[in-house]
Image: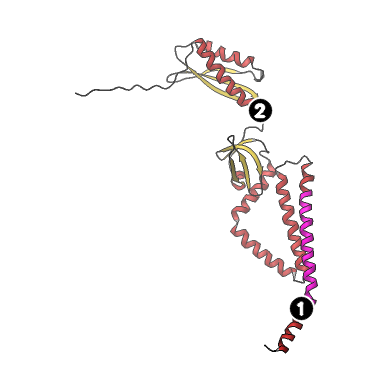
Amino acid sequence: MSEERLKELWEQLQEIVLSYGLEVLGALITLIIGAWIIKRVVKATGKRLAKTSMEPMIIPTIKGVVKIALWAALILAVVKQVNIETSGFIAVFGAAGLAVGLALQGSLANFAGGILLLTLKPFKAGDFVEINGQSGSVHGVSMINTTLKTPDNKTIYLPNGAVAGGNITNFTLEPKRRWDKVFGIGYGDDFDKAKKIIMDFLEADERVHKDPAPFVRVGNLGDSSVDITVRAWVDTAEYWNVNFDMIEKVKKEFDKQGISIPFPQRDVHIYNEK
């Protein structure tokens, strides 16, 4: 390559830098400052929402939407600053978005499911729920999935689409809950005596609601036991404490009073063939 040609290329490069360099530099500065502002705005939005009465699970989703919207606006501003036709860019961006959307239909369904969950509010953070056979305390709802924490500290991630379209049982939504239990006793035992033992424990326990009154009746005559049905209303927060305490108390008192609790038995016959 001749010296004249190199000189010509160098002059062209200088012309390009002088023509577009300032625009590119300005776009880079805009991008850096814009990214810093977006970070601050998203953080401030989260703090401000946290001070309101808004459900905590909604805040991460709102922050995510705000962040995406601000970044989209920033990218368009940067593109326009370097004299790229924004209408064509938007068309390309829209086509790319459509292609990505078709490829991520499941994720979009999960996003829509998350919006439904945050709008309808079938549960809140801390509620103990059962969703499609999975049980745990609600840890949070993101844009894509719902997180549960099991009693043994496992983490379960459920797609929002499946959660919104599935069966949800909320065990802690209501302030009180009915405790149901069946105690089986032998046919030779005095069931009136057994009923009185159970009722005395229920009436003596301050955690058991007196209105409606506890229910203790013979509910079934089983193959090997007389089944006593017990129903009592308690505060939801005390449900499991009452459950375990009552089972232990009734078992100890039944043993003390000689009331048997039948259990499955199997007879094995051995034949000697000679």
Q: Residue at x 71, y 88 (%)?
A: 5
Q: Quadrant of residue 156?
A: top right
Instruction: Tell me the magenta residue range.
Output: 17-44
Judge by depth and name the residue closer to the eye, 51 or 27: 27
Instruction: Tell me the residue that label 2 is attached to.
Output: 237
Image height of 41 relative to 236, above or below: below
Specify the amino acid type for callout 1. Ile
Mark 1 surroundings within 10 Å by alpha-carbon count, few (fewer than 14), some (14 through 19), many (20 or more)? few
Which label was assigned to residue 205?
Answer: none
Q: Nearer the viewer, residue 256 or 141?
A: 256
Q: Say which element carries label 2.
A: helix
Image quarter hosting the N terminus: bottom right
Quadrant for the C terminus, please. top left
Residue found at x 71% / y 70%: 88
Is 12 situated above or below 189? below
Spatial CA span between label 2 and label 1: 72 Å
Relative depth, front residue between 104 and 59: 59
Residue at the spot of label 1: 16
Residue found 53% across the figure and 15% down from its top = 252
Q: Vertically, is 30 above or below 63? A: below
Q: How was the colour assigned to the protein in this rendering? A: secondary structure
- The secondary element bearing badge 1 is classed as helix
Residue 211: x and y, percent?
67, 19
